[in-house]
Image (spheres, rainbow, N blue to C red):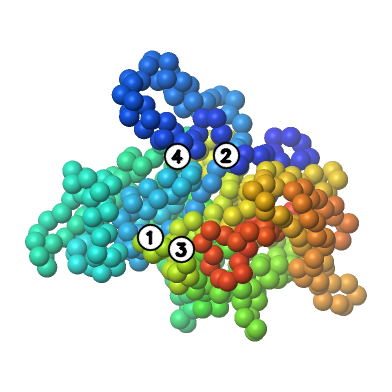
């Protein structure tokens, strides 16, 4: 559920630039430092004091909630990605992300692992090691052996995180993609902020496997005493997860409404629902039949490829999907808690200035951050329960609004309402032809219905 300190109102406040005056826009900061160095002007105590003041502002006693941009589905050489983990983290850090979860398959980046250099080159390309050395230097990169016996060490999470993290700017979150299968159908669940790797536990059915793996995540959270966020990945990958599977796995509260990998069947087929249709069907079953809370939708990259350029749609590259999370502090706990509460939206390019749901008026309000000459369309969608033996009406388009501000007031019969905001501008690196930049808010207006059951 979205939340706010103010009674009867859910509010997600504006911040396209996160903490605009002090955060960053890190690229501008680097340009300023470079100009100082070029002019050979020493840093003054006043400049140092100002930098410290900006850093302290992020941990002040009265820190206000703000937006933090992050990706919680990413791969590296630790499984089937094609770059070193610190190089992947560096990409996100230098592209104005605030947090990143590296989620390799069935492994947490721990311990000593050496990888044959030939295998590194085959997967990452002929200059992948040169890029690594160029960024971090030979003092950081560990190598041994020669010729066909040459190996390079993959750095574990606790070793490289201090190299890339910045207080109030960029945070690393330990994660894993728990990769399971039932009768050949992939069942993948990401667990973010874990303490140790979680083994897939299987099940007789897809829904049972989802539930079993979620229980394993819950057990670790309770044992370790830490907040862990679990979400179901790419349900249309191999068309493994049906709407009924997703609806009946009621321990699951989050799933990927957008995934930037080109092979996950985002748009569905003539026989199979799109991911958004699956979302509405599953949430309708939950609220109308199971009296269970709905699913929240996250957007992710599922990035594996860091060396091909835009235009190669067969590659899963970074920067295609992310979550914007409202939290007061950039810490794993605050980020995870906000995600679990539904205090976020997913995006493939659209930035929201504000999202509010007023309990008293039952109104969902969306305000959009403009971007150049782009125009925006907001579609409000919801479902209705069946009446007098008729089936439910699923994913009904309730209203369409053009412009930078849009609202919808529930009539009282809707099971929920959510908004999808589309720009007429394409993404910088589209996954399919004709793709638009979008943002997805979470379903609201359902809480009272469950409370009355």
Q: Mark 1 points at which residue?
A: 306
Q: Which of marks 2 and 4 is nearer the N terminus?
A: 2
Tag in front: 4 or 1: 4
Q: In this view, does 329 lie to the left or right of 441?
A: left
Q: Which of 123 and 151 is in front in this view?
A: 123
Q: In this view, does 206 lie to the left or right of 143?
A: right
Residue 317, quarter of picture: bottom left
Q: Earlier in the sequence, mark 4 or mark 1?
A: 4
Q: Distance between the residues labelled 3 and 4?
A: 21 Å
Q: How far apart are marks 1 and 3 (CA)?
A: 10 Å
Q: Mark 2 points at which residue?
A: 17
Q: Which residue lies furthest to the left in this view?
A: 146
Q: Earlier in the sequence, mark 2 or mark 1?
A: 2
Q: Earlier in the sequence, mark 3 or mark 4?
A: 4
Q: Mark 4 points at which residue?
A: 27
Which residue is at a point 33% across and 51% down the rendered structure image? 87
Q: Name the residue under label 3.
A: 310
Question: Where residue 197 sits: x, y (%)?
Answer: 37, 57
* Label 2 close to label 1 by CB (< 8 Å): no
Q: Earlier in the sequence, mark 3 or mark 2?
A: 2
Q: Residue furthest top?
A: 45
Question: Where residue 238 sits: x, y (%)?
Answer: 51, 78
Q: Is residue 203 left or right of residue 296?
A: left
* Label 3 close to label 2 by CB (< 8 Å): no
Up-down: is 390 above or below 200? below
State which quarter of the image contains the C terminus.
Answer: bottom right
């Amino acid at each position: 559920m979205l939340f706010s300190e103010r009674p009867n109102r859910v509010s997600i406040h504006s911040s396209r630039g996160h903490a605009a005056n002090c955060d960053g826009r890190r690229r501008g900061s680097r340009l300023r430092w470079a100009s100082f160095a070029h002019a050979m002007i020493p840093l003054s105590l006043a400049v140092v004091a100002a930098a410290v003041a900006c850093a302290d502002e992020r941990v002040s006693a009265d820190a206000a909630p703000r937006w933090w941009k992050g990706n919680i589905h990413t791969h590296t050489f630790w499984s089937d990605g094609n770059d070193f983990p610190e190089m992947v983290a560096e990409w996100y850090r230098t592209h104005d992300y605030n947090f990143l979860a590296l989620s390799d398959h069935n492994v947490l980046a721990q311990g000593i692992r050496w990888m044959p250099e030939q295998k590194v080159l085959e997967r990452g390309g002929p200059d992948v090691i040169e890029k690594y050395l160029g960024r971090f230097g030979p003092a950081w990169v560990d190598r041994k052996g020669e010729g066909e016996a040459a190996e390079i060490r993959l750095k574990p999470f606790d070793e490289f995180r201090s190299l890339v993290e910045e207080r109030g700017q960029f945070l690393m979150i330990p994660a894993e993609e728990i990769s399971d299968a039932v009768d050949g159908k992939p069942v993948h669940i990401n667990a973010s902020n874990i303490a140790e790797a979680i083994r897939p536990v299987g099940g007789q059915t897809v829904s049972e496997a989802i539930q079993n793996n979620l229980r394993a995540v819950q057990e670790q959270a309770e044992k370790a005493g830490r907040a862990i966020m679990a979400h179901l990945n790419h349900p249309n990958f191999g068309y493994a997860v049906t709407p009924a599977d997703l609806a009946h796995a009621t321990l699951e509260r989050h799933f990927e409404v957008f995934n930037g990998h080109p092979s996950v069947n985002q748009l569905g087929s003539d026989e199979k629902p799109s991911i958004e249709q699956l979302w509405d069907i599953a949430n309708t079953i939950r609220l109308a039949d199971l009296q269970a809370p709905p699913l929240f939708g996250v957007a992710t990259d599922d990035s594996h490829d860091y060396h091909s350029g835009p235009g190669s749609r067969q590659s899963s590259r970074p920067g295609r999907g992310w979550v914007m999370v409202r939290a007061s502090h950039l810490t794993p706990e605050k980020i995870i808690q906000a995600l679990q509460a539904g205090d976020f939206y997913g995006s493939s390019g659209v930035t929201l200035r504000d999202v509010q749901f007023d309990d008293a008026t039952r109104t969902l309000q969306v305000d959009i951050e403009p971007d150049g000459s782009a125009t925006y369309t907001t579609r409000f969608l919801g479902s209705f329960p069946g009446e007098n033996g008729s089936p439910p009406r699923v994913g009904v388009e309730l209203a369409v609004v053009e412009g930078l501000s849009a609202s919808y007031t529930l009539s009282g019969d809707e099971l929920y309402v959510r908004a999808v905001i589309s720009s007429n501008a394409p993404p910088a690196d589209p996954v399919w032809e004709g793709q638009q930049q979008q943002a997805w808010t979470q379903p609201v207006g359902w809480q009272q219905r469950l409370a009355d059951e």
